Structure formats: structure tokens, C-alpha cells
Image: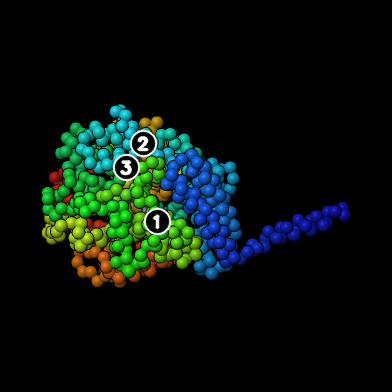
Amino acid sequence: MKLRLPLLLILGLILTACDQAPEETAAEFIARVEQEGNELNKELSAAFWVRNTYITPDTAILAAKAGERGLEFESRVVNQAKQYKDTDMDPQTARAIELMLRGSSAPAPNDAALRAELSAILTDMQGQYGAGKYCNAAGECRELQALEAVLAESRDYDELVDVWQGWRQVSPPYRPQYQRFVEIANQGAQDFGYKNLAELWKGGYDMDSKTFTLEARGLWNQVKPFYEELHCHVRAVLSETYGPDKVSLDGPIPAHLLGNMWSQTWDNLYPMVEPYAGVASLDVTAALIEQGYDEVRMAKTAEGFFTSLGLPALPESFYQNSMLKKPRDRNVVCHASAWDIDNGNDPRIKQCVEINEEQLGTLHHELGHIYYYLMYKDQPSVFKGGAHDGFHEAIGDTIQLSMTPTYLKQMGLVDEVVVSHEATINKQMKLALEKIAFLPFGKMIDEWRWKVFSEEIGPEDYNAGWWQLREEYQGIKAPIERTEADFDPGAKFHIPGNTPYTRYFLSFIMQFQFHKALCEASGFIGPLHECSIYNNKVAGEKLGAMLAMGQSAPWPDAMEALTGQRSMDGSAIIDYFAPLNAWLKEQNQDRSCGW
Ligand code: X8Z
Ligand code: ZN
């Protein structure tokens, strides 16, 4: 009896302690996470950078271990941040807590063994993709970029089939790992309080996930009719080229004929579909080669656009520490990426640069990420990030919209600027094959993943579910029979890499809004496809100010700062392409479109 009272008292005290406010204030908690996070980040980026630029079993061990520590940190931070939810905080602190609660694209489960497994799976899948090669019947082995070049240039139907299916042999080995990844990452999402990983991913846009789903669908519906016109015309040209037995005029297009490994952009078909043959040559690749450009000069050319806007020069370390050239003697992850190492002090890109126009474009894309890092460098870590992930993807692409014939002439990359209706249609066709063709692809990848994460598509239907969406959105089909022994989604970088993809869909819409706003700020009057903001400091200041906000405020604030609008809107991209849209409608007049 004597013992009981004190025991109850102690229990009572413990219970009261748990009821009380957390020991740290939210602001103290955020400051501690900032410091711990910065330390950890340095170590993790070192491990991941080395892994990505040197794929070996040893670097897999180091990266997986580092990833595990990152997940442990994330788990701790999110679970602690939960205590502050719905408590009284100043707006900045509340924003910081809200961002912490979002978790990452592969959220950490509470269970340590699961975290270790998750990290190991992701490291391994990425390595397998990065080291992927296809050896054909003749015993000739090629890596992804060489295979992509065949898709881009060859017009030999059977050779294209061979290379298309050959690359897709990379992914079946990790199909079981992907399935396990889905299980574990869903557990992580649930441990953070989400229904599944799809809900977590859709929760990153300052609105509830249902509203976001509708928002994205609305944007797609805005641009879909234009895509259907482009599809109709390209299909007709392909049918003429390969014959109606290979490309039928009322069905989906065989995926391997579109000039790209994933049929995501079709600009490599430009020579085949050029509306007015020979009017205004746009062959930038030839000029780059002729003038002896190398990787560094290509990067400096891209940097030159950003500095012309009044943005800072890249630090010297950028050129020392980036990987701009594919090493000859080891496996690396060639898919281009930008890295914010050491809090904006050591930004780098990793890209297997080849001397051509597409890669020059990608360099601008990557530098868009780098300039975001540089501009939000002084924000606390929790606010370092794009206003949303689509903003981060849109910056470099926005700049590319200013690479008009006039700009290219100034750079000595085209000979003459032809001003005529025909030249405009040609130029717009080339750009639409990149930007409009991409839209349904940008949309369908995460349609697939959202369904996989919510278990609407089960592991036994991964491939069938994929091709159903490929047909529904893009109007394309596999050139040969596919079965569940294949894992075609896994042959696209962002699936084993677990990078969310809706960001690119949003970016391709928003970059035209950004371009329009920056052109207006620069004082440009005229059709937007003729506007270049090169050298314009007013536009540069406006862009820089938006970048410097990072993710410190909900994205509509950043959108408003740049464009005056508070929403994403497809009318800018549609307006931009008005001349081509009219031209396509005329071409398609007597055709039956759709699939
Ligand atoms: O992955 C990228 C960038 C790196 S963030 C090179 N992009 C997407 C892709 O290649 O699939 C840029 C556009 C779409
Ligand atoms: Zn990017």
C-alpha cells in the first residue's frame, strides 16, 4: 500500500509532462534542425555525388548507408514537427513546420530495418539504370546515349524496334525491387499521416490533394485539343514515310518512330515534318560542331545568358567540380542533374554533354536549377526549394524560349534571320515537337505512379497499366507485344530514380507564362515567339527576385511576383502557338484525327 501512492504520483507526473508543450519552442526546433541538417547534407551529398559519378559496388555501400542516415533524420524531424501542428506560431515558423511535415519523395518509415531496405533498393535501382547497356545480336554493346542517338536519327523501322526493345531490357531485373519500394515508401507515407505515397506527393502544392488533382487535369484539358492536332499531323507524315501498314491513320502511333527513346519529345522528327522545306535553316548543331564548341564553351554560353540578365557569374568551383563530360573508363549516371552542395556555395551539374543543340538546351535547363540555388542561398534551409517543384524545372526552360533566331544569330549559331510566315511556322513546329508533344507524357507518368501507390494498379498489372495510359494520353502503342515479364516504366530514369514527374508537366505550362511576363517586363511589344529577354536587366531583376523567395511563401505568391497572376494557366502556351495551331487545323481539315 505504501508503495502505491508514490507510483501513481510518478505516473501522473509523466502523463502531465506528455500533455505539456514540447521542450523546445517551434523556432528552437527549426534552428536545431537547420544546423543538424546542414551538417548531414554535406556528408550525404558527398556520398551521392561520388555514387552518381562512379557506379561501383563500393559506392553503392557508401551511398546506401548515407541514404539510411538521411532517412533516419527525416523520420525524426517529421515526427517531432507533428507536435507543433495547429499550435500558435508566427507565419514564417508555421510555414517552416508545414514544409517539414510534407516529407520527401521517398518518405522514411518509422522502422529502422525498413529504412535500410528502402535506401538500399533506391541506390541499387539507380545504379542498374545508370550502368545499363544493350548488346545486340551482333554482339555490339551500347549505352543509353548511343541508343538514343539511333532513335533520333535512324529511319530504319526494324533497327528502331531493336534498339527500342533493347534498352527496355534494363528494367525487368529491378521490377521486384520497385514493387518492394512501393510497399515500403507507402509505409513511410502512412507513418507521416498520409493515406499513401500518391497523397503525399500531391500534398506539395499548397492546396489539398483533390484540388491539385483537378487543377492538373484542368491544365491538361486546356492543352489537349492542340496536342491532338499535332498528333494527327505527325501521324499522317509518319504514315507516308513508313507506309499505312506500319502507321495506320486511325490508331495510336508506334512508340519507336517518334525520334525519342520514350516518345516524350519529338523534335528529332523535325526534318521529316518541316512545314516549308528549306525555309530558314535552324541547324544549331551543325554550327556548334563547325565552330569547335566543347563542353565548357557550351556551359559558358548558357551561363552567358543568365549573366546578361544581371544575374551573378557562376563561382569558379562550378567549373572545377561539375562533371560535364562522360568519363571513358567508368559507369556514371548520365541523366543530367543539378546539385546544391554546401548551401549554394558549391553548386554543380552532372551531364554527359555532347556537342549538339539538345544538350545546349539541357545545359540551360540545368543552369536554371543552379541559379535558383544561388538566388535562395541566404534563405534558411527549410525555405531552399522552388516555390513548387514545377517552378524549379521551369527556369532554364523559360530562358530557352528567349533563344530566338535573332539571339542565335547574335551568338553566331545561325546564319540569317528569315522573317516570314513560313519561317514562323517552321520555328513553331520545331518547338511544338518538343513542348507540345511532351505534355501528355509529362502528365501520364505520375498518373501511373499515383495509381501504383494507391494500389489501383497492382504489381501484376504494372506494364499493362502503363501502356493503357500511354495510349490514352499520348496516343501511342508499343511496337511489339509487351507482357508482364517487361517493366517498361522502369526504363525511364525517373522511375528507378524516384523523381516525381508532374513537375515537368507543370513546368512546360508555366514556362510560357513566365516568358510572357518577362517579355512584358522587358518592354517587348509583339508576338511572344519573337521576344528574347537576352541582356534585359529589368526582366532579370524580376526573375531574380522571384528566385530569391525560394519556397518561403505559398507558390501563388511567387507566381504573382513574376506574372501578376496567382494561378497556373495554359492560355500562355496556347496563345504562343496560335500561328501553328491554325496551320495544323488547316492541314488536318480532311483527316480523321484521334486514336
Ligand atoms: O529530367 C529532366 C532534366 C533534369 S531535372 C534533364 N527532364 C525531364 C526528362 O528528361 O525526362 C527535363 C525535361 C523532362
Ligand atoms: Zn530539371
Query: Which of the labelled discs sits on residue 145, or is there none?
Result: 3
Residue 437 position within the rendered picture, expressed as x and y whole percent measured from the top left: 27, 48
How many other residues sit within 10 Å of disc 2, few (<14), some (14-19) or many (≥20)? many
| Quadrant into which the C terminus falls | top left
First in residue order: circle 2 vs circle 1: 2
Q: Is residue 404 visible?
A: no
Residue type (three-letter) at the residue carrying disc 3: Gln
Residue type (three-letter) at the residue carrying disc 2: Lys
Nearer to us: label 2 or label 1: 1
Task: Name the residue beneath numbered marker 2.
Answer: 133
Residue 219 position within the rendered picture, expressed as x and y whole percent measured from the top left: 32, 55
| Circle 3/circle 2 CB separation < 8 Å | no
First in residue order: circle 1 vs circle 3: 3
Task: Name the residue beneath numbered marker 1.
Answer: 320
Residue 120 position within the rendered picture, expressed as x and y whole percent measured from the top left: 51, 42
**As drawn, is 126 to the left or to the right of 27?**
left
Residue at 46% over, 67% down: 378
